[in-house]
Amino acid sequence: MTKTDYVSYITEDTGLTKADVMRVLDSFQRATIKGLKENGKCSITGFMTLTAKDKPEKIGRNPRTGEQVTIPAKTAITIKAGSKLKDALN
C-alpha cells in the first residue's frame, strides 16, 4: 500500500478531504521521527512499536572481490507488531 492508497482509503473511510488526510499523515510522520530521535521509541498500543537501535561500525567484505570494507555506524529501526495487528493477520 502506498501513501496515495492510504490517503484514498482514509478519505473514503472518514469523509475527510484528501488535503486534510495528507496533512495528518505528514504530521504523523514528523511525530514518529521526533519520537524516535528524542526517546528512541515510538509506540501505538496494540498496533506497533518502533525502536531506534544504534549499530556500531563494522568490517564487512565485498562479496565480488573479497576486499574488506568498513561499514559505517548507523541507526537502524526495528518494528514489533502489536497484538491487534497480529490478530488481524492471523
Image: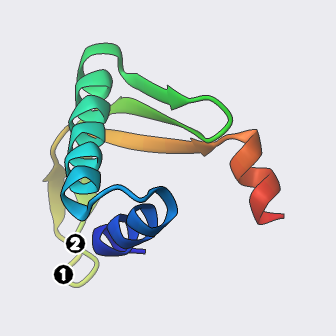
* Relative to 41, 84 lies left or right: right
* Relative to 24, 89 lies left or right: right
Q: Quadrant of residue 40?
A: top left
Please state which amino acid type lies under the numbered disc 2.
Answer: Asn
- The image shows residue 54 at horizontal and vertical percentages of 32, 30
Q: Quadrant of residue 63?
A: bottom left
Residue in view at x 37 percent, y 75 percent: 5
The answer to which of 73 and 29 lies nearer the viewer is 29
Q: Which residue is mark 2?
A: 62
Secondary structure of the residue carrying numbered label 1? loop
Residue in view at x 22 percent, y 72 percent: 62
Q: Are dots 1 and 2 in contact, CB under 8 Å?
A: yes
The answer to which of 36 and 1 lies nearer the viewer is 1
Query: Which quadrant: the N terminus?
Result: bottom left
Please state which amino acid type lies under the numbered disc 1.
Answer: Thr
Residue in view at x 43 percent, y 27 percent: 42
Other-residue count near label 1 (Cα within 10 Å), few / some / many at <14 / 14–19 / ≥20: few
Q: Which residue sits furthest top? A: 39
Secondary structure of the residue carrying numbered label 2? loop
Look at the image and tell me whether residue 73 can be seen: yes
Query: Which quadrant: the C terminus?
Result: bottom right
Q: Which residue is mark 1?
A: 65
Q: Quadrant of residue 69?
A: bottom left
Q: Is residue 39 above or below residue 71?
A: above
Residue in view at x 23 percent, y 51 percent: 20
- The image shows residue 19 at horizontal and vertical percentages of 18, 58
- The image shows residue 53 at horizontal and vertical percentages of 38, 31
Q: How is the image coloured?
A: rainbow
Q: Is residue 75 above or below residue 15?
A: above
